[in-house]
Image (cartoon, rainbow, N blue to C red):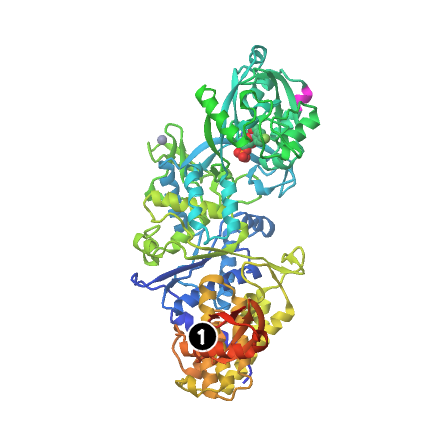
Amino acid sequence: MAYEASVIEQKWQKIWQESEAFEPKEDFTLPKKYILSMFPYPSGRIHMGHVRNYAIGDALARYYRKMGFNVLHPIGFDSFGMPAENAAIKHKIHPKTWTYENIAYMKKELFSLGFSFSKKRILATSDPIYTKFEQEFFIKMYERGLIYTKEARVNWCENDQTVLANEQVEDGKCWRCGHEVVQKVMPGYYVKITAYAEELLKELESLKGKWPTQVLTMQENWIGRSEGLEFTFWLDEESFKRADEASFEVFTTRADTIYGVSYVALAPEHKIVQNLLHKKFLDKKTMSQIQKMQNQSPKERQSAEKEGCFLGIYALHPLTKEKIPVWVANFVLADYGSGAVMAVPAHDERDFDFAKKYNLNIKQVIEATILPHTQKEGKLLESAEFNGLDCNEARNKIVEFFEKEKLGKRIINYKIRDWGVSRQRYWGAPVPMVRCEKCGIVPQKLENLPVLLPDDVEITGEGNPLDKHPTWKECECPKCGGKAQKESDTLDTFFESSWYYARFASDEKTWEDISIEKKSAKYWLGVDEYIGGIEHAILHLLYARFFQKALRDLGYVEGDEPFSRLLTQGMVLKDGAKMSKSKGNVVNPDDIIKKYGADTARLFILFAAPPAKELEWNDDALEGAYRFIMRLYDRALKLESGTLEEISQETLNKEEKYARLKVYEALKKSQEVYTKSFAFNTLIAACMEALNAFGVCKNKALEREAFYIILNILEPIIPHICFELSEKLFHFENFKKLELKPEVFVKDSLNLGVSVNGKKRAEIEVNASLSQDEIIWLAKEKVAKWLEGKSVIKEIYVPNSLVNLVVK
Ligand code: ANZ
Ligand code: ZN
């Protein structure tokens, strides 16, 4: 009988489906594991990145089930978002139709890979029931002050009449139409993630060793806590009159450099700059330059050429009272610190470049042996009474001085910004708020949720279809009952993906009625293993961490962190590049399954590289994986089926013992691999080695035991074939935990190094049952020629390793 993947795989997938084999149990006294791979966007079909992501998660889920854990391993679809609207424009298909057709197709693909997902908890974030609870959270957060409205600067495309996320601005142009993007002040809803900045930062500590260090660092930098000094610059008389402001604040982390300030720089949006603009105190050229700076997005400003203009006004140095010129500069961000910087070109690279470009003063105040602006340590110069102090010490002293003299104060700034969630888009969850002329902004009544999208819209890509709909906006004010209008913005899709993990943890029997069922969530959360791409290292993970804390404080869930452990998988490459349609290097999972079967695809993916590393597609290795499975199949069929015999270790000869040892070593390794290292590649290699060790073995009973164990080890990776062969050979019900046999690991003989005065002179092989004295005697015999004429003053035996003889 030849190996026929499709027959075997369909057979087992049917059995699993009919027996509901992968549904979590309701018994909350059992030990649990919640294994979650990041859910996909329903773009049309799954790609190799998905296969890898779910193959890793499935291996863990299957392993823990076998070990007796109650396992939750769900799947869903992150199904709102722009691509559905783009497809609608391109193919004249409704976004909803497009999305749900894709979901149906991708579900089939996923199950054809044999992934052990719960079938009862599949969700799509565009489902009305999901929208309902999401809107409930939105309103609860709004009522708690965790969501608020404000006018803020956003990226705006005039052509498409929509806000763009920073990622959708390419080179200052709209990613869709190529039109120039401008900065526009617009009202929108903001999630107050900054309220949790300190906690989000602090709890990264508890994730050390459980999340990749790289991700922790990225989160830390994104939150961006800085301690420093905030103080006031007063303008001189003349400048005060022009600017209509007497003073402004600056924030510095380097108070020790205060005597080196040679100019100050304001953000283009700064009040003083705006006043000067309005009063037309600036020349035409300066005004147009400022305009240009304002239209640069924050991201561009960080990378663009440093630019600025002198504003014709002066501020007074707080300590020396010297007149300092005030500039406007594109590198100063309006919404960080005070939107103003004291510039110290001698000790800051950015300030240095700027000073060079515009010929500004450069004053060194810290002793330096190399280029001043790269110097972080040193003693102060030209700094009055602070001269001679080490700069770290001086920083503290100067801050204390400012605080004592009431000139400024020590403050903490965060880089993280509140999260703008309003999108002028159709295919998203409507913001559940109403505008009433009398009452202002009012939340919808909870009993009226969900607020659903209208189906009858025309999607052209321009403007917001909800805004243009003739009747959808009209509604009754929830407060006064008068005529009001629904908010026509929809939510950023990150809002949906921030809490799906908690929804999965909820009992599906109450799904229609309860957002997150408490008892169930308490049992299942946090996610024990979260697996996904590194591209989500910042935003998604940060938003989800925020949601966990906010939902905790709203009484929906317990626990501080959503994901106890995180595994970030590497990308799947072909010819050194990420697989993508435009490069034409995509390998389609469906084709691989059709030609080789799901087990081969899974084996190849987990064997080709450790999960966190990049994986280079390799057709030969794929063939290799296929051949391995075929060989496994052929060899198993040559064994007689029947019960397992108890094998006694003493009856085995040397080769048999060795082969059995290899099998048990693989079993031992499997525990470490599935629970800690995830180095599936090494585990598969260990299984191959064990099977090879049986090449010369004639002991059928022993070989049957080997198959029993190896099929058990490999089941999480290649489940179909392992179930098939185990059924054929052992007529068994299900995989279970196997115990290690200590006697297998007892070695017959030991190889020991023998050293004289610490220098290795020989090696001996001794019977493991010998006593220490006997071993030392044998060792001395072996190195007799180095002992001649000397006396042994010390004998050291390190068990299983070496004998050292100290002689004189
Ligand atoms: C003087 C100075 C001297 C600075 C020196 C640095 C080095 P972090 O660590 O990122 O918080 N800064 C303050 N507000 C800014 C704004 N709105 N836009 C751009 N830059 C701003 O950086 C704080 C430092 O960034 C501050 O310390 C300030 O420059 C600048 F040798 O003050 B520093
Ligand atoms: Zn009203």
> Left or right: where does residue 61 sit relative to residue 321?
left
| Residue 737: percent from left, percent from top | 39, 72
Identify the image quadrant of residue 154.
Answer: top right
* Magenta residues (range): 284-288
Q: Which residue is mark 1?
A: 712
Q: Quadrant of the N terminus?
A: bottom right
| Residue 555: percent from left, percent from top | 32, 45
Looking at the image, is 396 positioned above or below residue 102? above
| Residue 481: percent from left, percent from top | 33, 33
| Residue 435: percent from left, percent from top | 41, 33
Q: Quadrant of the C terminus?
A: bottom right
> Left or right: where does residue 69 sit relative to residue 298?
left
In the depicted view, which residue is nearer to us: 229 or 297? 229
In the depicted view, which residue is nearer to us: 502 or 603? 603
Q: Main secondary structure of the magenta part?
A: helix
> Left or right: where does residue 564 sit relative to residue 573?
left
Mark 1 Cβ inside 8 Å of ligand 1: no
Q: Ligand 2 is found in which quarter of the picture?
A: top left
Res. 57 in view: yes
Q: Judging from the image, what secondary structure is the residue with disc 1 in?
A: helix
Q: Amino acid at mark 1?
A: Asn
In the depicted view, which residue is nearer to us: 52 or 757? 757
In the rendered image, the residue lying farthest to the front is: 789
Looking at the image, is 390 positioned above or below residue 561? above
What is the tally of numbered marks visible in this picture? Answer: 1
Q: Was residue 230 drawn as part of the magenta stretch in this picture? A: no
In the depicted view, which residue is nearer to us: 131 or 803? 803
Looking at the image, is 518 positioned above or below residue 574? above
Q: Residue at x 30, y 63 (%)?
A: 27
